Image (cartoon, rainbow, N blue to C red):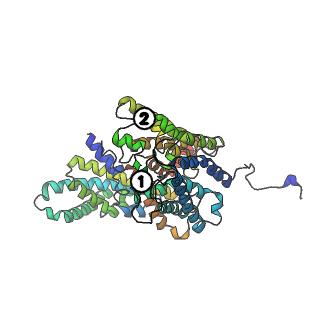
Amino acid sequence: MSDARYLVTASPHLRSRDSTPTIMWSVVGSLMPVAAFAVYYFGPSALLVILASVVGAVGTEAAWGKKGAVRDGSAAITGILLGLCLPAGLPLWMAVLGGAFSIGFGKIVFGGLGQNIFNPALLGRAFLQAAFPVALTTWPAVENVPWWSLRGDNFALPLMGSRVDAVTTATPLGLMKFEQVTTPIRDLAFGTTAGSLGETGAVLILLCGGYLALNNYLNWRIPASIFLSVAAFTTVLHLIDGARYPTPQFMLLSGGLMLGAMYMATDMVTSPTTNRGSWIFGVGIGFLVVLIRLWGGLAEGVMYAILIMNALVPFINRATQPRVFGTTRAKAAA
Amino acid sequence: MGDLIWILVSAAVVNNFTLALFLGLCPFLGVSGKVETAVRMGAANIFVMVLTALAVWVLNTFLLVSAPYLRIIAFIIVIASLVQIVEMAIKKLSPALFQALGIYLPLITTNCAILGLAIFSTNRGYGLLEGLFFAVGGGLGLTLALVLMASIRENLELADVPDFAKNMGLVLILAGALSLAFMGFAGMFSAA
């Protein structure tokens, strides 16, 4: 009776070495070069802002999340990603608040990891943008500033005005939209521009995300379809009126598109489950990004584009549900 | 023609009645449990909004010119009774349509989105055609919001939502999140 050949075990029988914590901590690892570059480029302020949003996110998860949920690393990812889409001079209490909102209202209320509809980091960013629009669009200047100096009033007290006058500037997208100045492509690719912490250094983000895609920790179809649709849409516009609409390479490399496409749109929980759905999802994001950037009231639209498409994911999943093996097409449609 | 399309798109997406202007929240929160009922509610909304646009145009052009101070009362009473009468007519003439829209029609006649539509189109001085496009756009926008909300809620039916956020709590949080996402459309095309 106890012959091992007759032992019946429950499925799954095919196992992978990857578990949720392995994948999540690999993502954290792959974000380290991006974060390190932000610190190199924006000084200690960048480190403080990222740490503050991680503290907000992980602290909230530890206090109100499911038991042991901190160890899977997903709250740490949310915190780092939120930190990377904030400006360096942001008061730290706002970053902590944003991290807490991301996890609290973006994840815990839905029942924890795997059940949320919206990307938590982006929801936190959208909340901060709605609550503190000025602080969230104050970009510290990047030239002629000593490395060790703070790039804004990081230690401002909650709800108090800023006591420090930092030198500020505009982002490449802001320059393009409101002043019709185009930033050279070289600066965008290697990160010597103003912007959020993770908005600079497009090539570095592409490499780090590529590492994840090679390990199959993210679905390459999503960034690929986002880049293709942004490139196609802007090429057409640029050919129609080259003076008015920017070149596709500018649109691809500027703003948060790289970080958004590589790390936020590909969030396993909030992206479609089918490959066909992933293409639809990515093309939708690319289209909305261009729409909001060129005709919207704001300079950057990656965050909103991803959130809107997140809301459509249940619909995409339903529309692209694969046929059950063995059933006929007519039955599947009924 | 471009202006008319713009009125429609603006009412449906950019200034979405529910997600940007926070009108018509009762059906948005109450009847968004299932996609199928949400679609019917949306269709009923479009129907009532088109009737409203017609009624508003008639009232504004022929009757309220001499008595503008009666505007809000006239809108409410005329629209509500008009919808009731049309509902009876549909019940008699097209039982199928009544089945689809019937029970939702009386629910929305006194909705704030309907009065909002009437007041907006009066304040902006819309003519008949503009008012109709505005009504269809507003109705489509409400339908969009309802269907989005319903598909998300169906998806979350099996989620392990903590006790404090069950049911209406989560729906309100979702409404806020959707509204945050739609802020991306704010001000779109206004500069162009």
- For image coordinates 18% across by 62% down, the residue present is B71
- For image coordinates 85% across by 54% down, the residue present is A6
Provide the chain ID for the residue under circle 2.
A
Residue under circle 1? A166
* Amino acid of disc 1: Ala
In depth, the one of B40 and B1 nearer the eye is B1
SS for dot 1: loop
Q: Position of residue A300 (x, y in %)?
A: 42, 46
**Mark 1: few/some/many CA within 10 Å (<14, 14-19, 20+):** some
Q: Quadrant of residue A262?
A: top right
Q: Left or right? Give the position of B5 relative to A248.
A: left
Using the image, determine if residue A170 lies above or below residue A10: above
Determine the CA span between mark 2 and mark 1. Answer: 35 Å
SS for dot 2: helix
Q: Position of residue A296 (x, y in %)?
A: 36, 46
Q: Left or right? Give the position of B75 relative to B15.
A: left
Res B156 seen here: no
Q: Position of residue B100 (x, y in %)?
A: 39, 55
Q: Position of residue A244 (x, y in %)?
A: 34, 34
Provide the chain ID for the residue under circle 1.
A
Q: Residue furthest bottom?
A: B164
Residue under circle 2? A234
> Same chain for marks 2 and 1?
yes
